[in-house]
Image: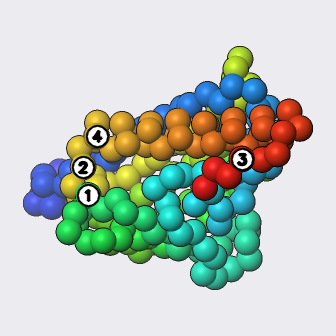
Amino acid sequence: MAPHDPESETAAPEWRGTVRAAAAGPTPDQAWALLRDFCSLNKWVSLVETCRRLEGDDGRPGCVRYCAGPVNMAAPGEAVGWSKERLLEVDAAGRSYSYEVVETNKGFGRYRATIGVEPDPAGCAVRWSFEADPVKGWTLEGFVGFLEKLAHGVAKRLEEEIMVNVDGDPALPIF
């Protein structure tokens, strides 16, 4: 018989989810060429205003980035939600990378995610998977819905950036 652990009775279940958004036109390789830069999230996710490398070698496991923007459901009165995120692994052949939140004011405990690009009949798709402890200020459904919006925004920006450049038109400012 296992010893009684009162904490296990109150521990909240782990959250897991995956969202996917198709981008019409870009190939997976074209999209990955842009998204593989771990410290460029501010170019692709509209709610990330700042993204910069804090330590480590850019694009190599161990690299830590700082991201900040206006959304902070854990503390809505704070002007900025920020996080420090560590790159865990890069799968260039599979067009994905995994990272974890190491410090934040946005209500995260343990959070690990993988962002990748995969083939899609439209061209390619952005896939964002996560495992996390429940996030303060969110329901699981609300958090997944939020990530869906972010993934669709990334797909739209990829379409704009890649297809404008492929068509030979001058790139439009999208940031």
The answer to whether residue 51 is seen in the rendering is yes
* Tag 1–tag 2 contact (CB < 8 Å): yes
Q: Position of residue 46 (x, y in %)?
A: 51, 52
* Tag 4–tag 1 contact (CB < 8 Å): no
Q: Is residue 76 above or below residue 120?
A: below
Q: Indicate which disc residue 172 carries.
A: 3
Q: Amino acid at mark 2?
A: Trp
Question: What is the tally of numbered marks visible in this picture?
Answer: 4
Q: Residue at x 60, y 55 (%)?
A: 175
Q: Amino acid at mark 4?
A: Gly
Q: Quadrant of residue 166?
A: top right
Q: Nearer the viewer, residue 55 or 75?
A: 75
Q: Residues within 10 Å of mark 3 (few under 14, many from 20)?
A: few
Q: Position of residue 59 (x, y in %)?
A: 73, 66
Among numbered discs 4 and 3, the one appearing first in the sequence? 4
Q: Position of residue 39 (x, y in %)?
A: 65, 66
Q: Which residue in the structure is indicated by mark 4?
A: 142
| Front tag of 2 and 3 | 3
Among numbered discs 3 and 1, the one appearing first in the sequence? 1
Q: Secondary structure at mark 3?
A: loop
Among numbered discs 1 and 2, the one appearing first in the sequence? 1
* Tag 2–tag 4 contact (CB < 8 Å): yes
Q: Amino acid at mark 1?
A: Met
Q: Residue at x 20, y 69 (%)?
A: 77
Mark 4 and mark 3: Cα distance apart in space? 32 Å
Q: Secondary structure at mark 1?
A: loop
Q: Residues within 10 Å of mark 1 (few under 14, many from 20)?
A: some
| Front tag of 1 and 2 | 1
Q: Which residue in the structure is indicated by mark 1?
A: 73
